[in-house]
Every structure is written in structure tokens, then in C-alpha cells.
Amino acid sequence: MNLKHIRFLLFIMLYLPILAVSENPKLPLIPMPKNVKVNAGNFIISKATNLSASAELTNEVKYLNTYFKNNHQIVFNLDKKAGNKIVLKINSLLPNLPGTYSISSNSNELILEAFDASGIFYGIQSIIQLLPINQVNEVSIPLIQVSDQPKYQWRGMHLDCSRHFFNTTFIKKYIDMLAYYKMNKFHWHLTDDQGWRIEIKKYPKLTEVGAWRNGTMIGHYRDQKIDSIKYGGFYTQSDIKEIITYAQERHIEVIPEIEMPGHALAALAAYPEFSCSKLPTQVGTRWGVETNVFCPSEETFHFLEDILNEVMEIFPSKYIHIGGDEVPKDEWNKSDLCQQLMKDQNLADANELQSYFIRRIEKLVNKKGKTIIGWDEILEGGLAPNAVVMSWRGESGGITAAKMKHPVIMSPGSHCYFDHYQASPEKEPLAIGGFTSLEKVYSYNPTPIALDSTEATFILGAQGNVWTEYIKTPSQVEYMMMPRMAALAEVVWLSKDKQNYSDFLGRLTLQIPYLNYKKINFCQTEFSK
Ligand code: ACM
């Protein structure tokens, strides 16, 4: 070795580590992990790579195996002595917070450690986001060191399957999209005026009658045009169990919403005896709010108890969303039964009657060890003692509830309604209205400054809502949710001080090949035009 060689070697030894850590390349990671460091070099994954894991991680091992087999034609090597290795390990010494994980890697070994199985799953998603697409047999990711944990425990997405029905194949794709962004709650809106979508064995007419409408609004609401095409569909209990299992494998909890006492026209078309007028009616064909709602009779409570018991049997979630929004009191004010009930129960007005209704339902749900969630209208007339409030008419309902020490999920229309326009309406497909840009979603802070630090602990997180009056197809659902869900995913995962919109846009741009590969439709207006 001559002097020139020695000088060159010295240069490499001195400067390479500095070059390696200072040049943190942009990575296609969303949400951005709390701490990431990139070292020089790659971890190569091929058929020579060995995979080993703690015994309790069979689900995550299966997920990883399936992912590599389906997307890269890689089946991991079973010979533990040869090749590099991926190690998945539960480490109970990591911070005691579900979802916490760390990744360390060198060219021989990639170790993913987590506090629990969900953390392993999130670590796997980070790895997947770093993988090239359309490459088989051998892929590589940069040598990364990651330590990461979610900021909020409720990282939710909602889908309205009443106004338009989406089959289980799409629901699985929807869940896959949530999983990729480390979202962990799927709020499944299963009943509304325009269609009842869940099979209830004790009341078959709910789906025989309630799942089908004789027409659908076309064009905008103001045009008041309705076609005469029969429309509908529903999920059997077996479909629903299949979806729940699919979601569980991806660490996503499925929360059913069974709307009451309003948004109940489809149920009342099947069983008009549970309305105050008891008159026959039809499944809704126009959007908006219907005045025909459940009557708070003993018979109705019995009917709803039967339904909820079946629902609670199917869904393992500890939460049942019971709606509670937009309940016109017209029918109640006209009803002798309601007037008498208000007298008997000492209720000052129809708002207190609504509160009485929700409290009765809460008791049925609590009896089974579960908790109700309701839209913020459930605050009116007095909040049920154990209810979780989902704040949609701005944040004020959520703030009030948190001050009352009730758990809150923030989902204000201003930032979390993905049925709103996301770009200039002239260039966009018809939507319900409103305007919620990608940047606006990204700017959201689910913890209002009006709360002190103790009250703030009642904010479970935030949720994006996809109401589907104007969203007829899976591809349109994707377009409305993406990329806004990606922005919300970072809002609920990463602390505010680490968020940076232009950096997010750069990472989002890097994800375009993946979105195309997965055939996910998305709105590109705000980035990489
Ligand atoms: C709602 O958007 N009506 C909760």
C-alpha cells in the first residue's frame, strides 16, 4: 500500500461516518417516525434472509411472510445459520405505550423490537414503506435506526356504507390503506335513513326491506332530482366477522355505528311500529335529515336492545357508536306518548327526552361491559354518564365533554370531513360542499388550547369521516380520502413540533409509485402537479 492509498483510507475512515449521518435522505415514510437516523449502506432482503420472531408474534410473522411473498416473491429462508436476518422481538422494557417500536439495522441484521404486537405491526409498515415496488427476488432498504411511538390512541377513519354500499373486497382495501398509515380505528357507519346494512337475525326485515331504496338523488341536493333505480345491499353477519378478523390482523379495531334515535328511516320502513306515528314509510331516497325518528316507547327500547345485543355479540370492540346526531323533535313534540313520558320522567323539554333516550341505551350497552360513543348532540339535555363524545360540529362539543372528564374523539367538519371539496370545486367531481384542503387537514391539532393539561388527557385522538351521499364508487372514496388521510395520519401520530408540511409533501410525492402500484386513486392537486 503506498502513501496515496493510506491517505485515501484515512479519508474514508474519518469522513464516511459523518457523511452517512448528516445526509439524511428523504424517506417515503408517513407518518414520519419520531426519530429516524439513516446510516450508509443497505439491508438486503432476499430468499437468503432468515426471519425469526417471539412466539406471540405469529400474526405479524404471517403478515410479513404474506407481504413479501405476494409483492416481492420472497419466501424467507428457514436455515437459521445462513444469510442475514430479520428479528421481531417483544421488548417489555420499551415505554409502556401500545404501538411503541424501534428498528435497528446493519447489513447482517434488522431488529424490530416493540412493546406489543401492534408496535411490531407498525414497525413492519415502516419497513414496507421503504421497500421499492415492482421488484422481485431481492429488495433492499437503507440502514435505519428508528424509535417511534404514536401520539394519540385514537387514529380513526369512518366510512358511510349506508348512503352508498361498498362490498367487502373494497372494505378490505380500505382497511389496508388505514393499516399502511398506522391508523387503528375503523368506524363503520352501517345504518342511516337511506339503507340498513347489517344483517340482524331477529329482525330480518331490517335488511329485506331496509337495505333497499327505490331511488337515489342524482346531482346536487338543490336540484332535488331522484332516479328510480332500486339500490341497496347489506353485510351478512358472516361478512362482518370476516372484516373484523381482517382488521384485527392489521391492529385495527372496528367500531359499528347503529344510528338512533334519528337517521332511522330505513329501520322504520321495515318496522314502522317503532316510530311515533306508526305509519308506513319508505327507505330514504333523498339526502338530508328526516323528521321520522324512533319513538322512545318501551317497545322501541326492547327492539333496539335486541339489535344491539346481536351487534355486541359480533363486534369485539368495547365501543358501540349509537349516533345521536341530527334528531328533529317534530314527531316527539306531536306525540302523546312523548308528552306523557316527559311528564312521568320530569323532563323539561325534547332535548332532555333525547338525553333520556341515550341514557337508556347507554345502560343496555354498559350492561354488556361496553361503552357508547355518540356525536356531540348527545351533550344536549345532559350527557350520559359514561359516554364518549365524537365532536363534529366544530370542537366546542369536544371541549365541553373533556372539561366534564369524558373521553373525546375530535372530528370537526372544518378539518376532518373528507366528503368536503379538497380543491377548487369547478375542477373537482361533485361533492357535498365545504372546503377542507390537504394543508388544512395537516394543520389540525386535535388537542384544543382551551384545555388544561389534565383535561387534554381526555382527547383520545381524531378521526376522518367519509360520508358518501356524493361518493358512489370505491375509486371515488379513495380520491376523497387520499391524500387527506395521510395528512391526518401524521397529525395523530407525530407531535406538532416535529410536523412540517413541505417535508410531508415531499414524502407524499415519494409514495406516488406505491399508490399507483396499489391502484389507489388520489387527488394530486396540492402536490407534484
Ligand atoms: C354528522 O356529520 N351528521 C355526524
Image (cartoon, rainbow, N blue to C red):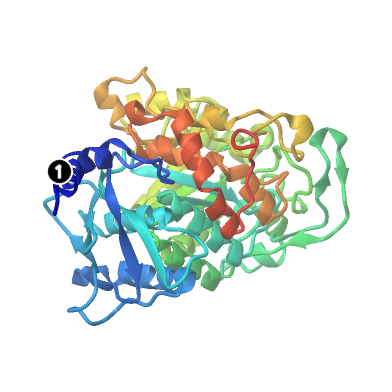
- For mark 1, give the secondary structure: helix
- Position of residue 247 relative to residue 453, above or below, is below
- How far across and down, in percent of the image, does residue 308 sit? 48, 58
Front residue (pair 515, 161)? 515
Which residue in the rendered view is the most extreme toward the front?
2
Residue at figure coordinates x 40%, y 50% from the top left = 182
- Neighbor class of circle 1 (other Cα within 10 Å; few <14, some 14-19, many 20+) is few
Which residue in the rendered view is the most extreme toward the bottom?
79
Residue at figure coordinates x 35%, y 76% from the top left = 47
Left or right: 360, with 42 as reference point: right
Left or right: 70, with 327 as reference point: left
Front residue (pair 431, 293)? 431
Q: Return the residue at label 1.
A: 10
Type of the residue with mark 1: Leu
Is any part of residue 189 visible from this angle?
no
Query: Ligand 1 falls in which quarter?
Result: top right
Front residue (pair 348, 205)? 205
Q: Quadrant of the N terminus?
A: bottom left
